[in-house]
Amino acid sequence: MGGDLHCHTKLSDGSLGIEDLVLLAKKKGIETIAITDHDCLAGTVRGKIIGDRYGVNVIPGVELSSRDEKTGKYVDILCYLSDAPDRLQGLCHKNSLARKKAAHFMMLQITKRYPVSAEFIIKCATGSTNIFIPHIMQALMESGYTNTIFGDLYNKLFNKESDGNILVTPKYPDIEEVVGAIHDAGGIAVLAHPYLYENIDSIPRLIECGIDGIEVWHPSATEAQRAELKKLATKNKLLMTGGTDFCGLYNRYPVSVGDIDVPDDAVTKLLGYKAKIRRMQKKAQKEAPVDTHYLQRSIALEITDGGMTAEVESTAEYAGYQEYGTRFMKGKPHIRPAFDEQKGKFKSDLGKLVR
């Protein structure tokens, strides 16, 4: 089987620990999964170690919360394979604080309506880095007020169209800031489940921000909607990914890991996309003259134009002198050789596509 590029663990709003998730994938014959906990990078390293132990390829990821200021809608953006995940810690921390503030207000409202204590809700969230709505629903379910997480009581309390709702939406950063942060960290930015939060209207702006892909295969999308997303991705030359959005007990949909039919080449293309943009960066770093290593470290990668443009540049103030030389010294090119090498490979790949 192929892969599941959207899974959650107990660290956010999933009910399974990392090892249990990996073991489930192993038993189902799933070769690759991505751990994409909400605004949380805590499981990426451990996930990789456990995955290697059981022979499951675990792709490091995170699902970052954001908001489209133009539409006012909540938008989830998946980040895969970041080179410097520590650069996302600040954003994750800011989002986590916003989520906690909203959760505390909602817990207060619950304790006023039901004989359920805040301490019990927090107990239901044991192991998580935050308090999510499913944890509140679990407390109500265990107290006998419902027999399901997502049902009539959930809709009454957390559907914004309900007169008695207690929903508080955290204030998250704009999509432009989040996509920029992902690229600054060397990651791949993918719009998660466009139909779940009706984010179709945000796609043109996300493309302007440099989004790299769209999650086409997701339980919230019908076959017809997936077909539309495929057309949209193909037209704009975006990556296509997919996954179950697995949360175990807290699943919004009745799916298990790997139950969504994601094409095998979706994983291959995701990894290949990352490999290509890394090769040019590493080639430039290799060719850079070495003295203090400052020039090498200053060579950065930025992806724009919906993934169509990858810019590798050196921010060192003397980089131009090294590249082109001066009247007193001969140039030692490091950007041009890397570009020329990738140009040849690009032409070769393009030729294969149009045959």
Image: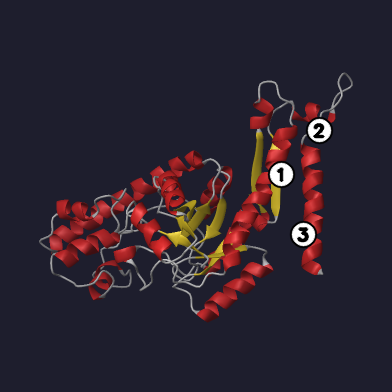
Q: Pointer 3: what residue?
A: 349
Q: Determine contact: label 2, label 3, CB under 8 Å.
A: no
Q: Pointer 2: what residue?
A: 333
Q: CA distance from mark 2 to mark 3?
A: 25 Å
Is residue 26 visible in the rendered structure shown here? yes
Task: Reply above or below: 321 against 280.
Answer: above
Of pointers 2 and 1, the one earlier in the residue sequence: 1
Front tag of 2 and 3: 3
Q: Residue furthest right?
A: 327
At label 3, which amino acid type do we have? Asp
Q: Residue at x 40, y 64 (%)?
A: 27
Percent position (x, y) of residue 198?
A: 47, 70
Q: Residue at x 25, y 53 (%)?
A: 125
Q: Nearer the viewer, residue 165 or 303?
A: 303
Secondary structure beneath dot 2 equals loop
Q: CA distance from mark 1 to mark 3?
A: 15 Å
Of pointers 2 and 3, the one earlier in the residue sequence: 2
Q: Residue at x 36, y 47 (%)?
A: 96
